[in-house]
Image (spheres, grey):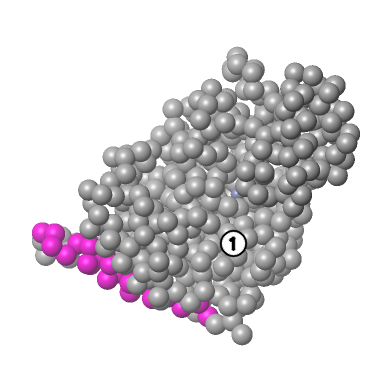
Amino acid sequence: MVPIVKKSRIFRSLFYLAAVMGCSILAAGIYWYAGKIFQRGISCKNCNVILVSLDTLSADNLSCYGYEHNTAPNLCAFADKQVNFPHAYANSTYTLPTHVTMFTGLYPSTHTIQEVGTKKLPESAPFLPSILKDNGYRTIFLMDQYNPHMPMDTVYFRGIDTQFDESTVPWSRALNEFENVIRRGEKAFLFIHSYYVHPPYNEEDKPASYADDDFDWIFLRDSDKTGNTQNFIDFLITALQHNLANNVPKDPARHRALLDELTAGVGNIITQQKALSRYDAIVKEYRENYDPLIRLDPADPRQMSYFKSVYDERIRKLDSGPLRELLSFVQKPSVAANTIVIITSDHGEEFGEHGFISHSTLYNPNTHVVFTMGIPGVNSRRIMEYVQTADITPTIIDLLGIHTSFVFDGISVARTLSGGRLLRRMLVAESARNITLRLGRWKLFLDKSGIDSVPVELYDTEKDPKEQINLLFSHFRFAQNMLSAYKRQIHEITPLSF
Ligand SMILES: [Zn+2]
């Protein structure tokens, strides 16, 4: 049996009140603030919904969130004309748990779907497509249907009427289907997920303006995937070193022997290729996992600059290609009149800022995400409240006027659209190694999750958005208070059971 998820939101209220105790807030100010909190939100009952998740798109790389390059003029024009949340954060930095959070309104530690292929989301859990389908919506999904991070069998197996495979079907086909549904007078929900920005990258992604071509090996080439090219051999050396250092191989002696032979043959590809011929099984295993980005050195600023330029180039192509088409589509009068459009991302990407690449840590380049909404009748607005991925499902169903008995970790942010405020609360982000607690501009890193957690880093992200100055020791008491609040909170969490 799977219990209904229960977690008291009273904690957040109490924590806020405790946090402000001692501050000299005037009664009139409290009265005004309470009025803002309980202000009614915008409603868009029976509206259609288009939700777009641009995988791996860091808000830090968009000009509408402060980036120096105008990588996405179409997306930023939309964000500037509609509603934009500059302080939006993911609750995880991996595709699988963040999307489950997006569709359930639950933190990863509550829905517990954190690792590929391990669990099935129970039918009793909240799931946005099912909620919408139960309320008369036709639900359309465009996403990669054979990707373990977006699993059709364990997560996306219910509530979806029409599925298109994003790896082979253009966005236009899903948009046409959406339009057909609303032409029939039915309500439609369309979800689009795109890996367009996510590595690997191909040679065609090489930035035209970038003269330095020393790092061409970061591109995925067919010749490197099928043959013993120098790029593949260099990848193999790095991967063997990495795996041996982390005790990964079951047969370390043979892996070590291959590494020694390849290292001894550096500068002579014929010698190295002969060595490969003696280790067929190992070579086959590594070829199946060929990823040239493993050779990137996060400590090398030239490599990181090049990597980021390629990433920015992918954003430009996404923006000028399918995203532009989508943004043109949603401006059609028949669509714009009654369709909510939400564009977000599941996590960002990091480029050595804290010693890592890809998206494993909980620093801002990975957690600062896009969250912009177009809502009929709502004018351009920049809303400075701190919001999170877990807020998306509660917000959508609130805007649509749907009532459910589910209790979410996220909350509806609809009231902010009419100038209301959100209760000050602590946002939680979770990874395999850390948890972060975010209270407004303050961000506290814990060494792990659970009651044994201890604080390890504290940042004032307003003054220090790059998270370079650890304030833990000068603000230790404040950090302890945040930790205490978190520990009270986890006592109230009932994770889904399986
Ligand atoms: Zn992702």
Task: Confirm whether residue 334 shows in the render.
Answer: no
Q: Identify the residue at horizontal 66%, vertical 38% (top origin).
A: 241
Q: Is residue 315 above or below residue 494?
A: above
Instruction: Pick the residue in front: 131 or 91.
Output: 91
- Classify residue 429 as left or right of residue 112: left
**Image spot of residue 448 (x, y percent):** 45, 59
Residue on which disc 1 sits: 114
**Image spot of residue 310 (x, y percent):** 61, 28
- Classify residue 194 as left or right of residue 300: right
Task: Confirm whether residue 104 shows in the render.
Answer: yes
Residue 254 counted in the magenta span: no
The quarter of the picture where the C terminus appears is: bottom right
Q: Is residue 303 above or below residue 147?
A: above
- Residue range (magenta): 4-24
Number of numbered callouts drawn: 1
**Image spot of residue 237 (x, y percent):** 71, 33
Q: Identify the residue at horizontal 36%, vertical 52% (top origin).
A: 456
Q: Secondary structure at mark 1?
A: loop
Instruction: Pick the residue in front: 490 or 131.
Output: 490
User: Is the CB of the residue bearing disc 1 within 8 angstroms of ligand 1?
Assistant: no
The quarter of the picture where the N terminus appears is: bottom right
Instruction: Pick the residue in front: 318 or 149.
Output: 149
- Classify residue 293 as left or right of residue 289: left
Q: Residue furthest top?
A: 211
Q: Identify the residue at horizontal 82%, vertical 39% (top origin).
A: 283
**Image spot of residue 488 (x, y percent):** 34, 72
